[in-house]
Amino acid sequence: MNIGNARVAGLQADLKMSDYQYSLALTITYIPYIAIELPASLVVKRVGPNVLLPTMVMIWGLITALQGLVTSFGGLLAARFFLGLAEGGLLPGVMLVMSQFYRRDQIQLRLALFFTSASLTGAFSGLLASAIVGMDGRAGRRGWQWIFILVRISCVHSSLCFLRTNKISNAGGDFHGCICACVLLHSSPDSDVIQISHRERERSH
């Protein structure tokens, strides 16, 4: 979505790309994206979602922000390739983790909210991009470069916060809140809270 907004803001013209080259830059992202999905899901179970998922988001956000520094078509291709490599394992990893913590009668709503939030993000990204384009010329950067840099810095910051958090806070006695905090913050796959989640699942059958 960001690259579409950046194209409108002048990315294709500044990098002197043809329409074919722009389409190639979009397509190359999906090659590593598809290839990494299965291996990433296997690694999530081994390493733990508390480490791997925030790390992938952080790397994804950093690479997206670095797209604002490219000066050629080749540089954009390289950035898009590594972007797909970093992003590909995130969605299946989240789906895998959620399926382990929620019962079948609970997971549908949460998956629906997850995909709805992604759609809403795309719906309003154009408004945010139009505001960022107004920074054209700041620090010698074009407006499309600021779209990449500013929008994804928040991903890096959020991921660092998750990785630095050492305990669950404000989860209280809410099972679902505790599980969400567990997955995103710190707990290991053999922690007490995950054992509780398995007992809840067994009682639902």
Image (spheres, rainbow, N blue to C red):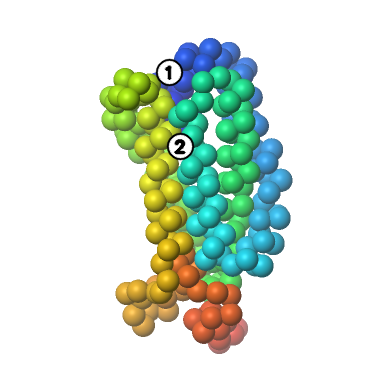
Number of labels in the image equals: 2
Q: Compare residues 175 and 109 and report the one nearer the observer.
A: 175
- Of labels 1 and 2, the one closer to you: 2
Disc 1 to disc 2, C-alpha distance:
17 Å
Mark 1: amino acid: Gly
- Left or right: 59 in relation to 134: right
Percent across and percent down for residue 37 are 67, 51
Q: Compare residues 50 and 1 and report the one nearer the observer.
A: 50
Compared with 184, 32 (above or below) is: above
- Left or right: 144 in relation to 86: left
- Left or right: 42 in relation to 115: right
- Left or right: 150 in relation to 66: left
The label shown at residue 65 is 2
Compared with 118, 16 (above or below) is: above
Mark 2 falls on what kind of element? Answer: helix
Mark 2: amino acid: Ala
Residue drawn at the location 62% of the way across and 17% of the way down:
20
Residue 1 visible in the current orientation: no
Q: Report crowding for label 2: few under 14, some 14 to 19, many 20 or more residues within 10 A (C-alpha).
A: many
Percent across and percent down for residue 39 are 71, 55
Percent across and percent down for residue 77 are 61, 28
The residue that mark 1 highlights is 10
Residue 148 visible in the current orientation: yes
Q: Report crowding for label 1: few under 14, some 14 to 19, many 20 or more residues within 10 A (C-alpha).
A: some
Mark 1 falls on what kind of element? Answer: loop
Residue drawn at the location 43% of the way across and 48% of the way down:
155
The label shown at residue 59 is none
Q: Compare residues 142 and 94 and report the one nearer the observer.
A: 142
Percent across and percent down for residue 194 are 53, 79
Residue drawn at the location 35% of the way across and 74% of the way down:
169
Residue drawn at the location 49% of the way across and 81% of the way down:
193
Mark 1 or mark 2, which has the lower sequence index? 1
